[in-house]
């Protein structure tokens, strides 16, 4: 409660004193305006971008990576200590899939606490190089978050050629693109969409992969920089007008 109170007080002062406020999604903008209606005229949506580092690697490189770590067919998920990342729903969905896909693994990365379970491999912290290889090798990336301010891992996975399933709601509705969405509070719904991906024949999977690559390419940091620059120029222009009028 103390951390929440401090955060709210800090945000309140920042909002009051800011000449402009940049947020990464329309969802975040709506949430901010609901909490602080007075800042309506100075909120700008500047979506994040995908680093050029996240891109498909040579197939041989990915194959060696999987052989070294004895990875077969797997789904990747991001485990975090924060409750809203909703790891337990993904674990429950995976358990429901195991009878149909007994050789499938669920690979988790991140600093979250993952309970040991059959078929679950927790890798903990991984480097960007490892994450890129994992995305490319995975049968699917699953993101069951209850809330996101943007959801960059969805786009990073797509940029590596990985099919994605993600929650409905918050900012994920804005960036999901070709991802299959589901109710994040329903493990059975997540199991069903994962099954859809896992059963797809090669041509359908290739089509989904290409759609994801095209979608991720629409989110570039150069575009974000241009939008931020426009915000800065707008603030400076207003300041100059105020100085001249004074």
Image (cartoon, grey):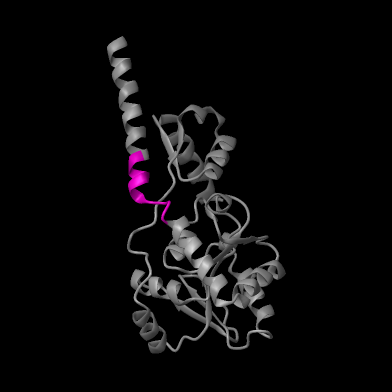
Q: Position of residue 161 (x, y in %)?
A: 45, 68
| Helix, strand or loop for the magenta stretch, by majority | helix
Q: Quadrant of residue 186?
A: bottom right
Residue at the (56%, 35%) spot, across then down:
33
Q: Residue at x 33, y 40 (%)?
A: 226
Residue drawn at the location 68% of the way across and 71% of the way down: 192
User: Considering depth in this image, is 204 or 20 the residue closer to the camera?
Assistant: 204
Front position in the image: 172 or 58:
58
Residue reaching furthest front?
203
Q: Picture coordinates of residue 23 (x, y %)?
A: 46, 42
Q: Position of residue 54 (x, y in %)?
A: 37, 64
In the image, 233 versus 54, the foreground residue is 54
Q: For this rendering, which residue is in front, 76 or 158?
A: 158
Residue 193, image x, y percentages: 65, 68
Vertical side of 53 occupied by 2: above or below: above
Answer with left or right where residue 235 lies relative to residue 104.
Answer: left
In the rendered image, the quadrant that contains the C terminus is top left
Q: Is residue 204 visible?
A: yes
In the image as oriented, which residue stretches furthest toward the top? Answer: 245
Q: Is residue 193 magenta?
A: no
Q: Could you tell me if residue 78 is visible in this image?
A: no
- Is 73 drawn above or below residue 55 in the view shown? below
Q: Which residues are magenta?
A: 217-226
Q: How many marks?
A: 0
Magenta stretch: includes residue 218: yes
**Residue at horizontal 34 percent and vertical 34 percent from the top:** 230
- Horizontal side, residue 196 vs residue 53: left or right: right
């Amino acid at each position: 409660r103390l951390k929440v109170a401090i955060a709210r007080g800090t945000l309140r002062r920042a909002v009051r004193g800011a000449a402009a406020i940049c947020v990464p999604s329309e969802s975040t903008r709506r949430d901010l305006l609901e909490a602080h209606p007075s800042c309506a005229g100075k909120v700008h949506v500047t979506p994040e971008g995908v680093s050029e580092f996240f891109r498909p690697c040579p197939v041989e490189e990915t194959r060696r990576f999987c052989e070294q770590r004895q990875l077969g067919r797997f789904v990747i998920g991001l485990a975090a200590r924060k409750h809203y990342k909703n790891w337990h729903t993904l674990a429950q969905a995976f358990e429901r899939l195991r009878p149909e896909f007994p050789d499938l693994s669920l690979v988790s990365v991140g600093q979250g606490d993952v309970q040991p379970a059959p078929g679950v491999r927790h890798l903990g912290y991984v480097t960007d190089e490892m994450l890129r290889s994992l995305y490319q090798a995975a049968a699917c990336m699953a993101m069951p978050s209850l809330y996101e301010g943007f959801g960059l891992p969805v786009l990073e996975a797509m940029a590596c050629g990985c099919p994605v399933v993600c929650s409905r709601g918050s900012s994920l509705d804005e960036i999901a693109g070709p991802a299959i969405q589901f109710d994040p509070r329903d493990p059975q719904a997540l199991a069903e969409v994962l099954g859809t991906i896992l059963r797809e024949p090669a041509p359908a999977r290739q089509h989904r992969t290409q759609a994801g690559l095209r979608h991720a390419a629409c989110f570039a940091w150069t575009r974000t920089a241009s939008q931020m620059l426009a915000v800065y120029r707008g603030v400076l222009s207003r300041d100059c007008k105020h100085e001249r009028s004074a």
